[in-house]
Amino acid sequence: MSYTKPTLVKDIQKGLISIIIPIYNTEEAHLRECLDSVLAQTFTNWEAILVNDGSTNDAGKIVDEYSEKDSRFIAIHKKNAGTLLARKTGLENSSGEFIANIDHDDTYYPKFLEKMYDKIKETNADFVWCNHGNKDNIALTENYYIFGANASENVANLFYRSKGIDYSLWNKLIKREIYANVRFPNANITMGEDSIQLLQIIHSSMSAAFISDSLYFHRNGGCSSKINIIPLAKSYIYNRKALKTIFNSNIPWNVTKALRYGYCQVAYYYFVLSLSLNICLFFAGKGIGFPLKIRNRIKNIIQGKKM
């Protein structure tokens, strides 16, 4: 599967934030809340690229309604191809110096763009990220981070959640120039699509800044207690392919180890909830192994032993 860069043809507008919103069959109330939260921003120099990814409900009509209401909303309608490729389309049709993302059923708090923009201008960081939901969920203090010269260590630290940087794109503001080296796979991926982009962003970044304020509301609806086996495995495979792309087919061992660590945590919780061996067999069929410590913990759980 090839990874391609977006074709960026529009002239960059200094100070403009481009908000990319992939939309697919969103509930009407949630989509309107999302778009209204963009309209309510205290920072007004934005454009929002509304990418209707082949919705079969009324989401497309709502996209057109908002684009007619405010010219800063740019409506795009395309065949369904998944969130990643919808984001690529949004990026290709954007003009901002900075790129923000929001999921179609989430909301920004009114000062999201203002505070994120002030922080990225103040620090000149390559990207900034903020807390979301309940700000007690994270123990970080507001800070500015300089990444090391070793790109593999920076990427590995993402999977270890070093410095609290999560895999999500939606609570971040990113310099457009960082996207120059971000490639998108031509695939419909339903799990782990954020990390496929973020690991490339980390690889190309020299610094990041954190805002401790809770500025983003992420809706967890639709998540189940079980992890679907196929999307989980697919996510691992495409993250690994993205790493092969940025490291020229030679992924450093520390990055491989970190990637396995990150996905083993997910797989471990799947076992806790389902006590199923299917996922282990599926990964094994793909040549993916788990560290011995994780395998032993899984074995103990399945046999009913205490951890």
Image (tube, helix red, strand yellow):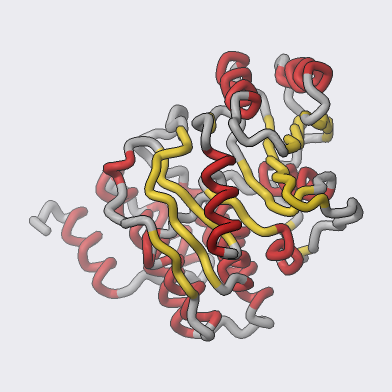
* Res. 183 in view: no
The residue that appears at 62% across and 21% down in the rendered structure is: 36
Asked if residue 100 is positioned above or below residue 154 in the image, the reply reads: above
The residue that appears at 73% across and 49% down in the rendered structure is: 15
The residue that appears at 54% across and 47% down in the rendered structure is: 116
Q: Is residue 296 left or right of residue 119?
A: left
Asked if residue 155 is positioned above or below residue 109 in the image, the reply reads: below
**Which residue occupies the extreme left position in the image?**
306
> Looking at the picture, how far across and down is residue 5, in whole percent?
79, 62
Residue 206 picture quarter: bottom right
* Res. 188 in view: yes
Residue 56 picture quarter: top right
> Looking at the picture, how far across and down is residue 158, in whole percent?
45, 66
Residues 17 and 156: in front is: 17
> Looking at the picture, how far across and down is residue 173, in whole percent?
59, 51
Count every numbered label the image shows and give the total: 0
Q: Is residue 191 left or right of residue 179?
A: left
Residues 150 and 18: in front is: 18
Task: Give the quarter of the figure containing the N terminus.
Answer: bottom right
The residue that appears at 44% across and 56% down in the rendered structure is: 210
Residues 123 and 149: in front is: 123
Residues 132 and 223: in front is: 132
Task: Give the quarter of the figure containing the C terminus.
Answer: bottom left
> Looking at the picture, how far across and down is residue 73, in whole percent?
77, 29
Q: Is residue 274 left or right of residue 44?
A: left
Asked if residue 264 is positioned above or below residue 70 in the image, the reply reads: below
Q: Is residue 71 left or right of residue 178?
A: right
